[in-house]
Amino acid sequence: MQVRRSLISTGLTVAVTAAVTATLTTTVGASATPAALPAAAASTTGAAAPAGHVPDPTTATLRQLAQHTKLRIGTAVNTDALANDATYRRMVAEQFSTVTPENVMKWEVVEPQRGQYDFSAADQLVRFARAHGQKVRGHTLVWHNQLPTWLTSGTWTPAQLRAILKQHIFTEMRHFRGQIWAWDVVNEAFNEDGSLRNDIWLQNLGPGYIADAFRWAHQADPKAILFYNDYNIEGINAKSTAVYDLVKRLRAQGVPIQGVGAQGHLDTQYPFPNDMLQNLRRFGAIGVDTAVTEADVRSVLPVDPAEVNAQAQGFSLMLQSCLLVRSCISYTLWGFTDKYNWVPGVFKGEGYATPFDENFNPKPAYDTMRRDLALAPSLPSRGVRGLH
Ligand code: G3I
């Protein structure tokens, strides 16, 4: 059998630092009373532990277990499944305190023809969230993907394209104004080597499009937390350092950017980002909130027991890192069930990416996350401004 490199990286207890290990993993599976754990956990991080009930991690939902940590737990939502699948709908409501539309706030969906807007599917999700006391992460305004054909096949001067982008941001954000907790304003603008992606925006508008997008977004909905969002920026590397440098520069210029989202798409055949805790900390130190925005851990199919375990470790590494960093305000799964999942359509022969199988049965990853939440420090608030 081929030994995949991730099996080495599953020594997570080594990965996340001794403090994390002591706080979150040593009592895993032990018979400690959950209610007694937050105080002990908090004492290792120096945080005061407010009196708070921690439910039984073997029976409570992610949402219930996260409450004492003030971390929002979310999922991307497939709105077709939400409309048609009662089990899916019930689980979204029970397990999560934020939702992100997987596709229906993207430009190709909201403005399929120029000037013809369709917010109906996204509106339904926003209504669902309100009915279930959930916050909404808006996804996404400026991206190179899922753009409408009228836009990508048109011929535009830079001035025209800039006006089109500005109008898109204003129209969409004003439509949802006051109802979106955090927006992914700019998505995936960097290459792996830290250079900017040579997409329609960079080619036509130059690198200033990023600052412009955040300024327009802030004007359109001043209360939303404005995020830069990308993949492979969980650990410290050329790409995450380029994002870090950009965010620092933009903030020094007064550009309203308040968050950085690490998507968190892991694969058990590659090493996991063992320095994620340090990476989230350095972003917090420059004054931005952080979030895990699209967590999933895929494998080559069929999975073997080691990969099942590695998946749990991957979700746990990202969750532990987020829980231990006060700037980290939410942890969102990019879908929670393999029944509706993007991975098999994009990575041939891969799947098993979420914590629940096609029949909504929980995998070991689910219990691991529940335990992480139960053992995490109880905090009075989260976010660099202590607002969440
Ligand atoms: O809407 C059409 C439908 O009309 C058509 O019948 C069907 C036929 O294939 O395609 C449908 O569109 C698909 C769309 O999802 C909605 O289901 C597209 O083909 C498909 O490419 C698209 O995939 C989405 C992908 O983004 C596109 O890049 C995935 O669902 C979505 O999970 C994924 O999400 C991205 C994040 O936005 C950004 N970060 C990476 C992440 C994973 O790729």
Image (spheres, rainbow, N blue to C red):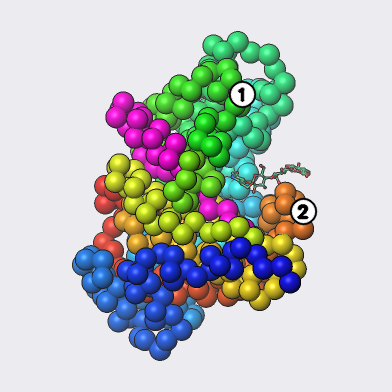
Q: Quadrant of residue 152?
A: top right
Residue 284: x and y in percent read: 32, 48
Locate residue 222, reporting x and y percent.
36, 33
Q: Quadrant of the N terminus?
A: bottom right
For discs 2 and 1, the disc positioned in front in the rendered view: 2
> Residue sitting at 35 percent across and 45 percent down?
283
For mark 1, does the 10 Å Cα neighbourhood hold few (<14), some (14 to 19), or many (20 or more) residues?
Answer: some
Q: Residue at x 32, y 78 (%)?
A: 37
Measuring from the top left, give residue 375's x and y in whole percent.
37, 74
Q: Is residue 139 magenta?
A: no
When asked about the image quadrant of residue 252, the answer is top left
Question: Closer to the camera, 378 or 78?
Answer: 378
Kind of residue sitting beneath label 1:
Ile
Q: Amino acid at mark 2?
A: Lys
Instruction: Kindly identify which residue carries mark 1.
Output: 200
Q: Are marks 2 and 1 in contact (CB under 8 Å)?
A: no
- Taking 224 as reference, is 361 left or right? right
**Is 244 in the magenta?**
yes
- The residue beneath circle 2 is 348
Q: Residue at x 38, y 35 (%)?
A: 245
Classify 223 as above or below 100: above
Specify start and end residues of the magenta stretch as a single range. Answer: 240-267
Mark 2 or mark 1: whose residue is earlier in sequence: 1
Residue drawn at x 54%, y 46% is 231
Q: Quadrant of ligand 1?
A: top right
